[in-house]
Image: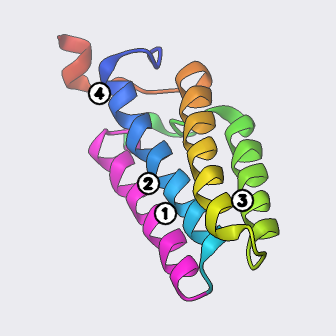
């Protein structure tokens, strides 16, 4: 396990946080099926990103490369806010603002508390 201040860890957390922010914006501003499609795309991207950075493998059994329950609570708060502003007159401007706040908050939280498992190539370098 490594500190998340390494360049590889930042490269892992940045796109995940960015797409989570975009997902929150889309959920706040659009009706199904687009909001559902965006959530599914985010989940697929998160799995593909984890596989690409070797955060899902046999060697890492029992501990995901995440940031404890705190990241789930953070995600639930932003997701709940998106659901609350959905369908309101302010959703068209508040959705993107919420997405930007979600991106910045999630990225900052993951940089500080996120767990990133080093791959074999990184440990030998």
- Cα–Cα gap, marks 4 and 1: 22 Å
Numbered label attached to residue 65: none
Q: Quadrant of residue 14?
A: top left
Q: Quadrant of residue 7?
A: top left
Q: Main secondary structure of the magenta part?
A: helix
The residue at which mark 3 appears reads as 79
- Cα–Cα gap, marks 1 and 3: 14 Å
N-terminal of the two: label 4 or label 1? 1
Residue at left 72%, top 63%?
Answer: 82
Stretch of the chain drawn in magenta: 32-57
User: Observer-nearest residue: 113 or 58?
Assistant: 113
Element carrying mark 1 = helix
Residue at left 45%, top 27%?
Answer: 116
- Cα–Cα gap, marks 4 and 2: 18 Å
Taking the magenta stretch, the answer to whether it contains residue 6 is: no
Labels 4 and 1 touching (C-beta < 8 A): no
Labels 1 and 2 touching (C-beta < 8 A): yes
- Cα–Cα gap, marks 1 and 2: 5 Å
The residue at which mark 2 appears reads as 46
> Percent from the top left, x then y, of residue 28?
66, 69
Labels 1 and 3 touching (C-beta < 8 A): no
> Percent from the top left, x then y, of residue 93?
63, 62
The residue at which mark 1 appears reads as 43
> Percent from the top left, x then y, of residue 25?
58, 62
The residue at which mark 4 appears reads as 119
N-terminal of the two: label 3 or label 2? 2
Depicted 6 relative to depicted 71: above or below: above
């Amino acid at each position: 396990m490594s500190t998340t201040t390494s360049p590889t860890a930042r490269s892992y957390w940045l796109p995940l946080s960015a797409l989570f922010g975009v997902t929150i914006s889309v959920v706040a501003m659009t009706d199904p099926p687009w909001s559902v499609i965006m959530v599914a795309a985010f989940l697929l991207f998160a799995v593909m990103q984890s596989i690409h950075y070797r955060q899902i493998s046999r060697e890492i059994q029992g501990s995901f490369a995440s940031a404890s329950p705190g990241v789930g609570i953070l995600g639930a708060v932003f997701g709940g806010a998106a659901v609350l502003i959905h369908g309101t007159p302010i959703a068209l401007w508040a959705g993107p603002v919420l997405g930007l706040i979600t991106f910045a908050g999630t990225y900052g939280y993951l940089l500080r508390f996120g767990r990133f498992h080093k791959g074999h190539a990184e440990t030998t370098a």
